[in-house]
Amino acid sequence: MELEKFKDLHARFFGKSLSEEVVQSEEYDAYVDAIHEDEACYNWATAEKLKSRGFDYENYCCLMMADKVYQSLDEDGEIRYSDVDVVINKWDEGLYGIPIHDGGTSMIIINYCPWCGTKLSK
């Protein structure tokens, strides 16, 4: 999908309550497919989301890493240890880790981004 068309659809659909008729439409299906299958559309939508929430995504190796770190934080910017949907954490010391969801705060420290392969610096 052309990025400009995606931006138009994003303005129509993102963050809005949509009727069942809209959700079942071909346009909405194309919009959702573009987020999942078109890297340019995914990157633009993710950057817009993170910008709108004041998250400094530009200091991460890739937008996927920035988005996953953002999703690991609560409203106060603290790590959500008990949330099983969290797939990666970043600590103030610059360490990154994959949480072990066993009820505690255990993690596996990682040195490379699982999405783009970049060596993670501290």
Image (tube, rainbow, N blue to C red):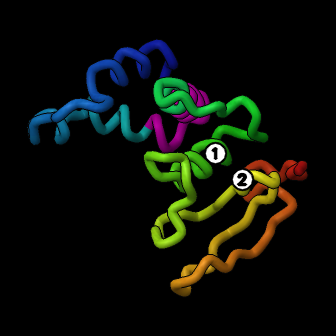
Left or right for 29, reference 104:
left
Q: Residue at x 88, y 50 (%)?
A: 122
Segment tinted magenta in the rendering: 34-47
The answer to which of 104 and 97 lies nearer the viewer is 104
Q: Is residue 81 left or right of residue 33?
A: right
Residue 35 appears at what percent x and percent y?
47, 37
Badge 2 marks a residue whose secondary structure is loop
Tell me residue 13's x, y (percent): 28, 28
Direction front: furthest residue: 76
> Where is mark 1, residue-wise?
64
- The residue that appears at 29% across and 32% down in the rendered structure is 15
Q: What whole-number distance in Å separates the C-alpha atoms at marks 2 and 1?
A: 7 Å
Q: Residues within 10 Å of mark 2 (few under 14, many from 20)?
A: few
Total numbered labels: 2
- Whether residue 119 is in magenta: the answer is no
Q: Is residue 102 above or below residue 38?
A: below
**Residue nearer the viewer, 122 or 110:** 122
Question: SS of the residue at dot 1?
Answer: helix
Secondary structure mainly formed by the magenta segment = helix
The amino acid sitting under disc 2 is Trp
Task: Tell which circle, 2 or 1, labels the residue nearer the N-terminal end.
Answer: 1
Which residue sits at x=58%, y=44%?
67
Instruction: Identify the disc placed on residue 76.
Output: none
Q: Quadrant of residue 17?
A: top left
The residue identified by callout 2 is 115
